[in-house]
Image (cartoon, rainbow, N blue to C red):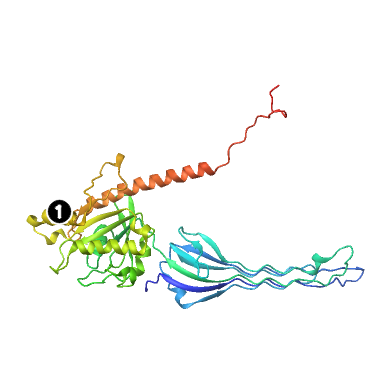
Amino acid sequence: MKFIDEARIEVVGGKGGNGAASFRREKYVPFGGPDGGDGGRGGSIYAVADENINTLVEYRFVKRYQAEHGERGGSADCYGKGGEDIELRMPVGTQVIDMDTEEVVADLTQHGQRILVARGGKGGMGNLHFKSSTNRAPRQCTPGEEGEKRMLRLELKVLADVGLLGMPNAGKSTLIRAVSAAKPKVADYPFTTLHPNLGVVRLNDAQSFVIADIPGLIEGAAEGAGLGHRFLKHLSRTGLLLHVVDLAPFDPEVDPVHEAQAIVEELRKYDEALHDKPRWLVLNKLDMLSDDERQQKIDAFIDAFGWPRDVADDRDGFDMQARRVFTISALTGEGTRQLTRAIMDYLEVARAADRAAAAQAAEAAAPAPRSNLIQPANGVDD
């Protein structure tokens, strides 16, 4: 199935049914009075997160969704039937944005989440509601309201703990194959990866995280060059970025330092918040270097790139802002175990901090307990 991460649709809530104006016409019931019922409400449209869906391809073919109208009210105080609601099932990670106001209508981050995106109209009132002591035979009734109409833009942002970024052929797909069960296509030409790939890295039965690989970036990506600019949004939900660098490019005229700096600049141009995310350097393709030149290449790159040589392995004093450097060979697996262990340590500290912050926020929002003691009316103890 083709990976589709953007779509535009129109949603229209159902129109409410009209109210009825009728009167009782029964034998032995003189002065029966009004008995017109209300119209039924129009159907509404909901966006529902479904973890069994991973693309928005369905919404490329069907562009308009109209909920059912409510039925007209009837006589004998009968209310009209309400219109059926519509549920639009979307992948977890989808944002629903109103194209007119740019308001985020829904952000579907959990399976089963259900959010209203287009409300159905209310049903009209029957003449039953208009009777009074001075108006015993009202003929008024009101029409049903129109349903809400919206043009929506759907944007899928994959949910992952860690995101890989780098130039084409830096070895990102090889790395995700080495550390997870994902099997993205790997080849020796640029733009082998054409859509994001997700892999689950499982260290043991109790520890795992999700890693995302997006198509490679090139200089000018923020202005639309290459493929990666379309997929940078998929890194916005990640907690940690791994900047994968090809330390041994085939072309001797290619400067790894310049390419790495270009990637950082593209992140800054695209989104300052993405640029400011925690980011680690992963120097790849050690297998292409001899033992004699490995350390020399590593030291030269770090010095030219201006990256601090921070090391923070102590989990009790884990520095969340440390700019760490890892040297690996994704092809042979060298160094990948140390990398995944460090990522897991980082994520566990981050998750614990998130849980503590959530508990603190919930505690602050909770109402203060009320005292059971009764205070004297004059405020003075007897």
Q: Is residue 20 left or right of residue 338?
A: right
Nearer to us in this view, 320 or 38: 320
Image label count: 1
Task: For residue 85, say whether it is visible.
Answer: yes
Q: Residue at x 15, y 58 (%)?
A: 286
Identify whether 264 is placed above or below 65: above
Tell me the quarter of the image containing the N terminus: bottom left
Q: Is residue 134 left or right of residue 82?
A: right
Indicate the quadrant where residue 374 lies: top right
Task: For residue 228, say whether it is visible.
Answer: no
Q: Which residue of the protein is positioned furthest toward the left in this rendering? A: 292
Q: Position of residue 354 (x, y in %)?
A: 41, 47
Tell me the quarter of the image containing the C terminus: top right
Indicate the quadrant where residue 356 lies: top left
Q: Which residue of the protein is positioned furthest toward the bottom in this rendering? A: 61
Q: Position of residue 40 (x, y in %)?
A: 69, 69
Q: Residue at x 78, y 71 (%)?
A: 141
Task: Bin the neighbour count of mark 1 within 10 Å (Cα to Cα): few under 14, some 14-19, many 20 and up.
Answer: few
To which residue does mark 1 refer? 299
Nearer to us in this view, 42 or 298: 298
Nearer to us in this view, 251 or 75: 251
Indicate the quadrant where residue 149 lies: bottom right
Q: Position of residue 237 (x, y in %)?
A: 39, 58
Q: Secondary structure at mark 1?
A: helix
Q: Which residue of the protein is positioned furthest toward the top in this rendering? A: 382
Q: Position of residue 41 (x, y in %)?
A: 67, 68
The amino acid on which the numbered mark 1 sits, given as a three-letter code, is: Asp
Nearer to us in this view, 197 or 366: 366
Identify whether 316 is placed above or below 343: above
